[in-house]
Image: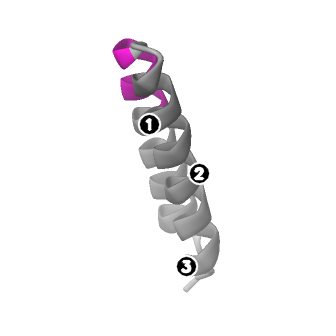
Amino acid sequence: MNYAELYYIVFDAITDALDSMNCGKYATAKLQLIAAQQKAEELYISADD
């Protein structure tokens, strides 16, 4: 399992969500975080480890 890849997915989503929140786009921020969570979870579950 490449945990660095999962970290970068989540870190980038947090950065994007904070940018969205700074623009008052809270719904967009929520969706960005949910999408990252789902992507990281899918990668983790599908890993061969």
- Amino acid on which the number 1 mark rests in the picture: Leu
Q: Give the residues drawn in magenta, as a range.
A: 26-32
Q: Eyeballing the image, is 46 above or below 32? A: below
The residue beneath circle 3 is: 3
Q: Report whether 27 appears left or right of 6.
A: left
First-in-chain label (1 vs 3): 3
Q: Report whether 39 appears left or right of 21.
A: right
Q: Report whether 25 appears left or right of 48.
A: left
- Amino acid on which the number 2 mark rests in the picture: Asp
Task: Tell me which corner region of the image, top left, top right, bottom left or bottom right, holds residue 5.
Answer: bottom right
Spot occupied by residue 41 in the image (x, y as percentages of width and height): 45, 55
Spot occupied by residue 18 in the image (x, y as percentages of width and height): 44, 37
Graded by Cα atoms within 10 Å as few (under 14), some (14 to 19) or many (20 or more), the crowding at tag 2 reads some
Q: Eyeballing the image, is 25 above or below 17? A: above
- Amino acid on which the number 3 mark rests in the picture: Tyr
Measure how far apart labels 1 and 3 are at the Cα level: 22 Å
First-in-chain label (3 vs 2): 3
The residue beneath circle 2 is: 12
Task: Tell me which corner region of the image, top left, top right, bottom left or bottom right, holds residue 30.
Answer: top left
The residue beneath circle 1 is: 18
Determine contact: label 2, label 1, CB under 8 Å.
no
